[in-house]
Amino acid sequence: MDEKKPYLAVILIQAIYAGMFLLSKAAFNGGMNNFVFVFYRQAAATIFIAPLALFFEWKKVVPLSFVTFCKIFLLSLFGITLSLDIHGMALVYTSATLAAATTNCLPVITFFLAVLLRKEVLKLRTAAGVAKLSGILVCMAGAAILALYRGPQFNLLGHHHHLFGLPKTQESYAHDLSSSKTWLKGCFLFLVSTTLWGLWLVLQAPVMKSYPPKLLFTTLQCLFSSIQSFAIAIAFERDPDQWKLGWNVRLVAVAYCGIVVTGVTYYLQACVIEMKGPVFLAMSTPLALIITMLSSAILLGEIIGLGSVLGGTLLVGGLYSVLWGKGREQKIMNEGSTLTAEVDHIKECSELKEAAAAAISKSPPPLLIV
Protein backbone atom coordinates (compact mmCIF):
# COMPACT_ATOMS: atom_id res chain seq x y z
CA MET A 1 0.00 0.00 0.00
CA ASP A 2 2.90 2.34 0.76
CA GLU A 3 4.14 1.94 -2.82
CA LYS A 4 0.82 3.25 -4.15
CA LYS A 5 0.78 6.39 -1.99
CA PRO A 6 2.93 8.56 -4.33
CA TYR A 7 0.73 7.64 -7.31
CA LEU A 8 -2.46 8.40 -5.42
CA ALA A 9 -0.93 11.66 -4.19
CA VAL A 10 0.00 12.93 -7.68
CA ILE A 11 -3.46 12.04 -8.99
CA LEU A 12 -4.98 14.05 -6.14
CA ILE A 13 -2.60 16.97 -6.76
CA GLN A 14 -3.44 17.20 -10.44
CA ALA A 15 -7.17 16.81 -9.70
CA ILE A 16 -6.89 19.76 -7.29
CA TYR A 17 -5.21 21.85 -9.98
CA ALA A 18 -7.90 20.87 -12.47
CA GLY A 19 -10.50 22.00 -9.95
CA MET A 20 -8.66 25.31 -9.63
CA PHE A 21 -8.90 25.94 -13.38
CA LEU A 22 -12.58 24.97 -13.48
CA LEU A 23 -13.70 26.97 -10.45
CA SER A 24 -11.72 30.04 -11.52
CA LYS A 25 -13.31 29.93 -14.96
CA ALA A 26 -16.75 29.38 -13.43
CA ALA A 27 -16.30 32.43 -11.19
CA PHE A 28 -15.19 34.58 -14.13
CA ASN A 29 -18.09 33.35 -16.26
CA GLY A 30 -20.35 34.33 -13.38
CA GLY A 31 -19.15 37.92 -13.67
CA MET A 32 -16.46 38.06 -10.97
CA ASN A 33 -13.61 40.48 -11.62
CA ASN A 34 -10.35 38.56 -12.02
CA PHE A 35 -8.30 41.14 -10.08
CA VAL A 36 -10.69 40.97 -7.12
CA PHE A 37 -10.56 37.18 -7.31
CA VAL A 38 -6.75 37.15 -7.05
CA PHE A 39 -6.84 39.43 -4.00
CA TYR A 40 -9.39 37.27 -2.17
CA ARG A 41 -7.48 34.13 -3.12
CA GLN A 42 -4.17 35.42 -1.74
CA ALA A 43 -5.82 36.82 1.37
CA ALA A 44 -7.42 33.43 2.07
CA ALA A 45 -4.07 31.71 1.52
CA THR A 46 -2.35 34.11 3.93
CA ILE A 47 -4.98 33.61 6.63
CA PHE A 48 -4.73 29.83 6.24
CA ILE A 49 -0.96 29.37 6.10
CA ALA A 50 0.19 32.05 8.58
CA PRO A 51 -0.90 30.16 11.75
CA LEU A 52 0.72 26.98 10.42
CA ALA A 53 3.98 28.81 9.74
CA LEU A 54 4.01 30.37 13.20
CA PHE A 55 3.18 27.05 14.88
CA PHE A 56 5.75 24.89 13.09
CA GLU A 57 8.57 27.36 12.45
CA TRP A 58 8.41 30.00 15.18
CA LYS A 59 11.72 28.67 16.55
CA LYS A 60 13.32 29.07 13.09
CA VAL A 61 12.55 32.77 12.72
CA VAL A 62 15.61 34.62 11.40
CA PRO A 63 16.17 38.39 11.10
CA LEU A 64 14.78 39.82 7.86
CA SER A 65 17.25 42.25 6.33
CA PHE A 66 16.13 45.12 4.13
CA VAL A 67 17.74 43.56 1.04
CA THR A 68 16.00 40.21 1.64
CA PHE A 69 12.74 42.05 2.29
CA CYS A 70 13.02 43.80 -1.09
CA LYS A 71 13.86 40.53 -2.85
CA ILE A 72 10.86 38.72 -1.37
CA PHE A 73 8.62 41.69 -2.18
CA LEU A 74 9.74 41.71 -5.83
CA LEU A 75 9.42 37.92 -6.05
CA SER A 76 5.85 38.21 -4.81
CA LEU A 77 5.07 41.05 -7.21
CA PHE A 78 6.28 39.40 -10.41
CA GLY A 79 6.05 35.69 -9.60
CA ILE A 80 2.69 35.66 -7.80
CA THR A 81 0.68 38.88 -8.10
CA LEU A 82 1.33 39.78 -11.74
CA SER A 83 1.48 36.13 -12.78
CA LEU A 84 -1.93 35.38 -11.24
CA ASP A 85 -3.51 38.62 -12.49
CA ILE A 86 -2.31 38.01 -16.04
CA HIS A 87 -3.35 34.35 -15.78
CA GLY A 88 -6.84 35.45 -14.72
CA MET A 89 -7.11 37.85 -17.67
CA ALA A 90 -6.05 35.05 -20.02
CA LEU A 91 -8.60 32.66 -18.50
CA VAL A 92 -11.37 35.20 -19.10
CA TYR A 93 -10.40 35.37 -22.79
CA THR A 94 -9.95 31.62 -23.35
CA SER A 95 -10.87 28.39 -21.55
CA ALA A 96 -9.98 26.21 -18.59
CA THR A 97 -8.64 23.56 -20.97
CA LEU A 98 -6.11 26.00 -22.45
CA ALA A 99 -5.09 27.06 -18.93
CA ALA A 100 -4.34 23.44 -18.04
CA ALA A 101 -2.52 22.90 -21.35
CA THR A 102 -0.20 25.87 -20.93
CA THR A 103 0.70 24.66 -17.43
CA ASN A 104 2.59 21.84 -19.15
CA CYS A 105 4.92 24.52 -20.54
CA LEU A 106 6.06 25.47 -17.03
CA PRO A 107 8.87 22.89 -16.57
CA VAL A 108 10.15 23.62 -20.09
CA ILE A 109 10.02 27.41 -19.68
CA THR A 110 11.64 27.11 -16.25
CA PHE A 111 14.48 25.04 -17.71
CA PHE A 112 14.91 27.51 -20.61
CA LEU A 113 15.13 30.44 -18.17
CA ALA A 114 17.59 28.52 -16.00
CA VAL A 115 19.81 28.02 -19.07
CA LEU A 116 19.65 31.73 -19.90
CA LEU A 117 20.55 32.61 -16.30
CA ARG A 118 23.39 30.03 -16.38
CA LYS A 119 21.87 27.93 -13.61
CA GLU A 120 21.49 24.96 -15.98
CA VAL A 121 23.78 23.62 -18.71
CA LEU A 122 22.58 22.48 -22.15
CA LYS A 123 25.07 20.02 -23.67
CA LEU A 124 24.10 19.56 -27.32
CA ARG A 125 26.69 16.84 -27.93
CA THR A 126 24.92 14.40 -25.64
CA ALA A 127 21.66 12.51 -26.10
CA ALA A 128 20.22 14.17 -22.99
CA GLY A 129 21.02 17.65 -24.32
CA VAL A 130 19.44 16.89 -27.69
CA ALA A 131 16.33 15.54 -25.94
CA LYS A 132 15.99 18.71 -23.86
CA LEU A 133 16.44 20.98 -26.89
CA SER A 134 13.95 18.90 -28.89
CA GLY A 135 11.47 19.13 -26.04
CA ILE A 136 11.74 22.92 -25.99
CA LEU A 137 11.12 23.11 -29.75
CA VAL A 138 8.17 20.70 -29.56
CA CYS A 139 6.63 22.75 -26.75
CA MET A 140 7.02 25.90 -28.84
CA ALA A 141 5.24 24.15 -31.71
CA GLY A 142 2.44 23.05 -29.39
CA ALA A 143 2.02 26.56 -28.05
CA ALA A 144 1.87 27.93 -31.61
CA ILE A 145 -0.85 25.42 -32.57
CA LEU A 146 -2.86 26.31 -29.46
CA ALA A 147 -2.67 29.99 -30.34
CA LEU A 148 -3.11 29.93 -34.12
CA TYR A 149 -5.19 26.85 -34.94
CA ARG A 150 -8.66 26.15 -33.59
CA GLY A 151 -9.77 23.41 -35.98
CA PRO A 152 -13.04 21.47 -35.83
CA GLN A 153 -14.85 21.84 -32.52
CA PHE A 154 -16.26 19.02 -30.43
CA ASN A 155 -19.20 19.49 -28.06
CA LEU A 156 -19.26 16.31 -26.01
CA LEU A 157 -22.70 16.69 -24.44
CA GLY A 158 -24.43 19.03 -26.87
CA HIS A 159 -26.64 21.80 -25.47
CA HIS A 160 -27.21 21.26 -21.77
CA HIS A 161 -27.63 23.17 -18.55
CA HIS A 162 -24.44 23.99 -16.71
CA LEU A 163 -24.06 22.53 -13.24
CA PHE A 164 -22.77 25.87 -11.92
CA GLY A 165 -25.82 27.77 -13.12
CA LEU A 166 -23.78 30.33 -15.06
CA PRO A 167 -25.58 33.20 -16.80
CA LYS A 168 -23.92 32.65 -20.17
CA THR A 169 -25.64 30.45 -22.71
CA GLN A 170 -23.85 27.85 -24.78
CA GLU A 171 -24.25 29.95 -27.92
CA SER A 172 -22.88 33.13 -26.35
CA TYR A 173 -19.99 31.24 -24.81
CA ALA A 174 -19.07 29.66 -28.13
CA HIS A 175 -19.34 33.08 -29.76
CA ASP A 176 -16.94 34.54 -27.20
CA LEU A 177 -14.34 31.88 -27.90
CA SER A 178 -14.75 32.14 -31.67
CA SER A 179 -13.00 35.50 -31.80
CA SER A 180 -9.49 34.74 -33.07
CA LYS A 181 -8.12 38.03 -31.73
CA THR A 182 -9.46 37.35 -28.24
CA TRP A 183 -8.13 33.78 -28.28
CA LEU A 184 -4.70 34.90 -29.51
CA LYS A 185 -4.57 37.59 -26.83
CA GLY A 186 -5.40 35.00 -24.18
CA CYS A 187 -2.66 32.64 -25.43
CA PHE A 188 -0.11 35.44 -25.30
CA LEU A 189 -1.14 36.35 -21.76
CA PHE A 190 -0.88 32.70 -20.70
CA LEU A 191 2.67 32.63 -22.09
CA VAL A 192 3.60 35.80 -20.18
CA SER A 193 2.04 34.45 -16.97
CA THR A 194 3.83 31.09 -17.26
CA THR A 195 7.14 32.84 -17.98
CA LEU A 196 6.78 34.96 -14.85
CA TRP A 197 5.91 31.82 -12.89
CA GLY A 198 8.98 30.02 -14.22
CA LEU A 199 11.21 33.00 -13.43
CA TRP A 200 9.77 32.98 -9.90
CA LEU A 201 10.72 29.30 -9.49
CA VAL A 202 14.27 29.91 -10.73
CA LEU A 203 14.91 32.95 -8.53
CA GLN A 204 13.43 31.49 -5.35
CA ALA A 205 16.43 29.30 -4.54
CA PRO A 206 19.01 32.08 -4.03
CA VAL A 207 16.53 34.14 -1.99
CA MET A 208 15.71 31.20 0.28
CA LYS A 209 19.40 30.88 1.17
CA SER A 210 19.13 34.18 3.03
CA TYR A 211 15.72 33.27 4.52
CA PRO A 212 15.53 29.45 4.87
CA PRO A 213 12.24 28.82 6.82
CA LYS A 214 9.98 27.54 4.02
CA LEU A 215 6.56 28.11 5.56
CA LEU A 216 7.48 31.58 6.80
CA PHE A 217 8.96 32.37 3.40
CA THR A 218 5.71 31.28 1.73
CA THR A 219 3.64 33.25 4.24
CA LEU A 220 5.60 36.44 3.55
CA GLN A 221 5.08 36.01 -0.18
CA CYS A 222 1.35 35.44 0.27
CA LEU A 223 1.10 38.50 2.55
CA PHE A 224 2.98 40.75 0.14
CA SER A 225 0.96 39.39 -2.75
CA SER A 226 -2.30 40.13 -0.89
CA ILE A 227 -1.28 43.77 -0.41
CA GLN A 228 -0.11 44.12 -4.02
CA SER A 229 -3.17 42.44 -5.51
CA PHE A 230 -5.46 44.62 -3.38
CA ALA A 231 -3.81 47.76 -4.75
CA ILE A 232 -4.24 46.50 -8.33
CA ALA A 233 -7.84 45.36 -7.75
CA ILE A 234 -8.95 48.63 -6.15
CA ALA A 235 -7.38 50.54 -9.05
CA PHE A 236 -9.29 48.56 -11.69
CA GLU A 237 -12.55 47.80 -9.88
CA ARG A 238 -14.44 50.39 -7.81
CA ASP A 239 -17.91 48.78 -7.97
CA PRO A 240 -18.83 47.55 -4.45
CA ASP A 241 -21.00 44.78 -5.91
CA GLN A 242 -17.93 43.19 -7.49
CA TRP A 243 -16.35 42.84 -4.06
CA LYS A 244 -19.29 40.90 -2.62
CA LEU A 245 -18.83 37.15 -2.42
CA GLY A 246 -22.06 35.66 -1.06
CA TRP A 247 -22.88 31.96 -0.84
CA ASN A 248 -22.15 31.19 -4.49
CA VAL A 249 -19.47 29.91 -6.82
CA ARG A 250 -17.34 32.99 -6.14
CA LEU A 251 -16.89 32.10 -2.48
CA VAL A 252 -16.25 28.44 -3.32
CA ALA A 253 -13.59 29.39 -5.90
CA VAL A 254 -11.83 31.80 -3.53
CA ALA A 255 -11.82 29.34 -0.60
CA TYR A 256 -10.75 26.45 -2.81
CA CYS A 257 -7.88 28.28 -4.53
CA GLY A 258 -6.72 30.01 -1.38
CA ILE A 259 -6.91 27.10 1.06
CA VAL A 260 -6.94 23.80 -0.82
CA VAL A 261 -4.55 24.71 -3.64
CA THR A 262 -2.09 26.62 -1.45
CA GLY A 263 -2.38 24.49 1.67
CA VAL A 264 -3.07 20.90 0.66
CA THR A 265 -1.00 20.78 -2.53
CA TYR A 266 1.98 22.41 -0.77
CA TYR A 267 2.09 19.52 1.70
CA LEU A 268 1.34 16.79 -0.85
CA GLN A 269 3.95 18.04 -3.31
CA ALA A 270 6.59 18.11 -0.56
CA CYS A 271 5.70 14.49 0.33
CA VAL A 272 5.85 13.31 -3.29
CA ILE A 273 9.19 15.02 -3.91
CA GLU A 274 10.57 13.41 -0.76
CA MET A 275 9.36 9.93 -1.78
CA LYS A 276 9.86 9.97 -5.57
CA GLY A 277 11.71 13.16 -6.48
CA PRO A 278 10.73 16.28 -8.46
CA VAL A 279 10.86 14.58 -11.88
CA PHE A 280 8.15 12.12 -10.87
CA LEU A 281 5.94 15.03 -9.78
CA ALA A 282 6.56 16.97 -12.99
CA MET A 283 5.70 13.93 -15.13
CA SER A 284 2.21 13.86 -13.61
CA THR A 285 1.38 17.38 -14.89
CA PRO A 286 -0.49 16.16 -18.02
CA LEU A 287 -3.09 14.52 -15.77
CA ALA A 288 -4.44 17.98 -14.96
CA LEU A 289 -4.95 18.65 -18.68
CA ILE A 290 -6.90 15.43 -19.20
CA ILE A 291 -9.06 15.95 -16.11
CA THR A 292 -9.70 19.60 -16.97
CA MET A 293 -10.55 18.90 -20.60
CA LEU A 294 -13.18 16.31 -19.73
CA SER A 295 -14.57 18.19 -16.71
CA SER A 296 -14.81 21.54 -18.50
CA ALA A 297 -16.83 19.96 -21.29
CA ILE A 298 -19.22 18.36 -18.76
CA LEU A 299 -19.46 21.07 -16.08
CA LEU A 300 -18.90 24.29 -18.02
CA GLY A 301 -20.09 23.28 -21.45
CA GLU A 302 -16.79 24.27 -23.05
CA ILE A 303 -16.29 23.32 -26.68
CA ILE A 304 -12.99 21.51 -27.28
CA GLY A 305 -11.23 22.31 -30.54
CA LEU A 306 -8.93 20.01 -32.49
CA GLY A 307 -6.17 22.60 -32.11
CA SER A 308 -6.39 22.31 -28.33
CA VAL A 309 -6.02 18.52 -28.53
CA LEU A 310 -3.07 18.63 -30.95
CA GLY A 311 -1.35 21.50 -29.15
CA GLY A 312 -1.83 19.88 -25.76
CA THR A 313 -0.41 16.60 -27.08
CA LEU A 314 2.71 18.35 -28.37
CA LEU A 315 3.13 20.19 -25.07
CA VAL A 316 2.97 16.89 -23.17
CA GLY A 317 5.44 15.28 -25.60
CA GLY A 318 7.86 18.18 -25.27
CA LEU A 319 7.54 18.06 -21.49
CA TYR A 320 8.43 14.37 -21.32
CA SER A 321 11.37 14.90 -23.69
CA VAL A 322 12.85 17.60 -21.45
CA LEU A 323 12.21 15.54 -18.33
CA TRP A 324 13.82 12.46 -19.90
CA GLY A 325 16.91 14.48 -20.78
CA LYS A 326 17.07 15.96 -17.31
CA GLY A 327 16.65 12.54 -15.70
CA ARG A 328 19.32 11.05 -17.98
CA GLU A 329 21.83 13.73 -17.00
CA GLN A 330 21.02 13.25 -13.32
CA LYS A 331 21.56 9.50 -13.64
CA ILE A 332 24.95 10.01 -15.30
CA MET A 333 25.95 12.48 -12.58
CA ASN A 334 24.92 10.02 -9.85
CA GLU A 335 26.88 7.20 -11.50
CA GLY A 336 29.89 9.48 -11.81
CA SER A 337 29.63 10.46 -8.15
CA THR A 338 29.41 6.79 -7.12
CA LEU A 339 32.44 5.90 -9.25
CA THR A 340 34.42 8.82 -7.83
CA ALA A 341 33.53 7.77 -4.29
CA GLU A 342 34.69 4.18 -4.99
CA VAL A 343 37.99 5.40 -6.46
CA ASP A 344 38.57 7.66 -3.47
CA HIS A 345 37.82 4.74 -1.15
CA ILE A 346 40.32 2.52 -2.97
CA LYS A 347 42.96 5.26 -2.82
CA GLU A 348 42.32 5.73 0.89
CA CYS A 349 42.68 2.01 1.53
CA SER A 350 45.92 1.91 -0.48
CA GLU A 351 47.33 4.85 1.45
CA LEU A 352 46.45 3.16 4.74
CA LYS A 353 48.17 -0.04 3.65
CA GLU A 354 51.29 1.85 2.58
CA ALA A 355 51.31 3.76 5.87
CA ALA A 356 50.95 0.52 7.82
CA ALA A 357 53.75 -1.14 5.86
CA ALA A 358 56.04 1.86 6.42
CA ALA A 359 55.29 1.82 10.13
CA ILE A 360 56.10 -1.87 10.36
CA SER A 361 59.38 -1.45 8.47
CA LYS A 362 60.49 1.37 10.79
CA SER A 363 59.57 -0.43 14.04
CA PRO A 364 62.48 -2.02 16.07
CA PRO A 365 62.95 -5.79 15.85
CA PRO A 366 61.35 -7.87 18.59
CA LEU A 367 63.50 -8.82 21.65
CA LEU A 368 64.59 -12.46 21.97
CA ILE A 369 64.28 -13.93 25.45
CA VAL A 370 66.71 -16.80 26.14
Image: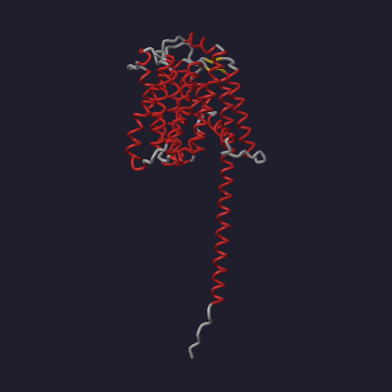
Residue 164, given in percent of the width and then of the height, sits at: 40, 16
Percent x, y for residue 37?
Answer: 41, 20
Residue 132 or residue 13, whichever sits in front: 132
| Residue 69 falls in image quadrant | top left
* Left or right: 35 as drawn, with respect to 324: left
Q: Which residue is drawn at 37% across and 25% down?
A: 43
- Image height of 164 relative to 330, above or below: above
Residue, x 36% and y 32% (percent of image)? 49
Looking at the rendering, in which quadrant would you find the N terminus? Answer: top left
Establish if 141 lies above or below 179.
below
Task: Give the residue at the far bottom of this rendering.
Answer: 370
Q: Where is residue 284 in the image (x, y as percent from the top left)?
A: 50, 33
Q: Where is residue 82 in the image (x, y as percent from the top left)?
A: 47, 24
- For this orientation, the residue located farthest to the right is 125
What residue appears at the point 38 percent right and 18 percent down from the top-left corner? 250
Q: Locate residue 256: give its quadrant.
A: top left
